[in-house]
Amino acid sequence: MDEITLLASRLPDAPPPAPEVVARARARLRDPGFRTAKPGPRRWTPMAGLATATATVAVAVAVTVVVANLGDAVPQTVATPLKGKQLLLAIADRTEKAPVETGAYWRRRSVVGALFPVDAVSSGVVINTYDITLWAPRESGDPALASSTMQRKRSLTLPSGKAREPWDPAKKYDYMLGSEPNRCEYSWKVEPKGVLYDRRAAELTFADLEALPTDPAALLERLRAVWTDRPNVSPAPGRAGRGEVPKDAKEEQYLSLAAVSLLNLPSPPALRAAALRILADRPGTEVVGEVVDALGRTEVAVRVNADRPSEVRIPTDYQVMVDPRTGALAGNRSTAVTNRGGLPRGTVLNYAAYAEQGWTDERPARPGGCKRVSNIP
């Protein structure tokens, strides 16, 4: 039941107008001296319903239609779900009004998974799933921690005679067999310049984020200036989903990834809203719609202009997940666009889902029993 229906069910039925009221109205309409005001332009305001982990993301425009004759007036309410880029703009409108929060550390816990075919003909695949926690300090002199624990490394083989189906990380499979001991690694370092983990927009610190313009046009102009000075952009082949820009990226592709980067960083609400509006305006942006992520939450999937370089071996469809409640990035996923290695088109090949993220005044501690490494992927 939507909010409008729920509200209507709780209100008493309105009684019909009294006969004398109807008579006065008719006489007034027949009066030649009666003039109606000329209506001005009507402006519709999109209204977004808040989603929960188990409810659909209901973002709709509530339109009230009055059907009238000389007798009764019957109001009717029609809820029209927003689709496409209008959905992103509605999320931006809500995000902009959120309160600004802060703390000593920005902390995020992610669940990351990847699927690998055993070979091109068998039904076996290997699934690696990691639990990754990131601590990004506000003060550049404080240490940053990233820890990664392999939750499972299992082989998935479909039972004999069962047809292959796209693997969905949100589903539970009773034919997942085998396991290996968990492996724990961590990195612990002080970033001298305080540069944050996602460098697709530029090498940004917390102070840089807070100084960026929140007007979409001004922010877009700033990003175009960064693109002109490309040494400040972090390039790498085939890593659009890992905090880097493909080395053969074009300007429009960079602008799309830069907007995603600002959603991925702990940006203030007004900056996230501006990034959403820029992303919605990019030619290569396609709002896929509501999807269920690996944690069973309803998010909004967006396909961005982030084509992989031509040398990538397996073409994939890269999508980012936007949290409709906060406008922040909630994760990403890549799916197969062709039947490959025994896996059908649409199979999720890898994903990241941000289980928790937000500000905290707690401080990180080195995880015991873990191997220290130089970096966590």
Image (tube, helix red, strand yellow):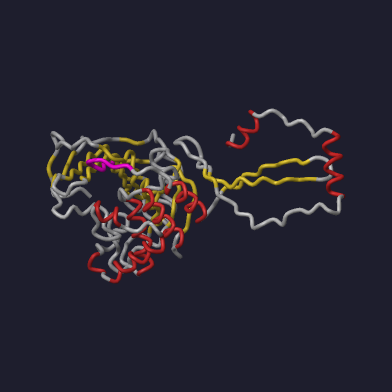
291 and 338: which one is in front? 291
- Residue 332, placed above or below residue 19: below
Residue 342 in view in this figure: no
Q: Nearer the viewer, residue 263 or 43?
A: 43
* Residue 53 occupies quadrant: top left
Residue drawn at point x = 24 percent, y = 62 percent: 234
- Residue 223 place in picture, x, y as percent: 33, 64
The number of numbered discs placed on residues in the rendered structure image is 0
Residue 100 visible? The answer is: yes
Q: Judge whether residue 104 is colored magenta.
A: yes
Residue 176: x and y in percent read: 35, 36
Is 50 situated left or right of 133 in this image?
right
Q: Residue at x 27, y 39 (%)?
A: 131
Q: Does the magenta run of residues contain 292?
A: no
| Residue 15, position as x, y percentages in the image | 76, 30
The residue drawn where x is 46% and y is 36% is 52
Which image quarter: residue 307? bottom left
Point 32% across, 42% down: residue: 101
Q: Is residue 71 left or right of residue 160?
A: right
Which range is magenta?
Answer: 101-108
Specify the farthest residue to the bottom.
228
* Left or right, 106 with reference to 41: left
Q: Position of residue 97 (x, y in %)?
A: 43, 46
What quarter of the picture does the N terminus occupy?
A: top right
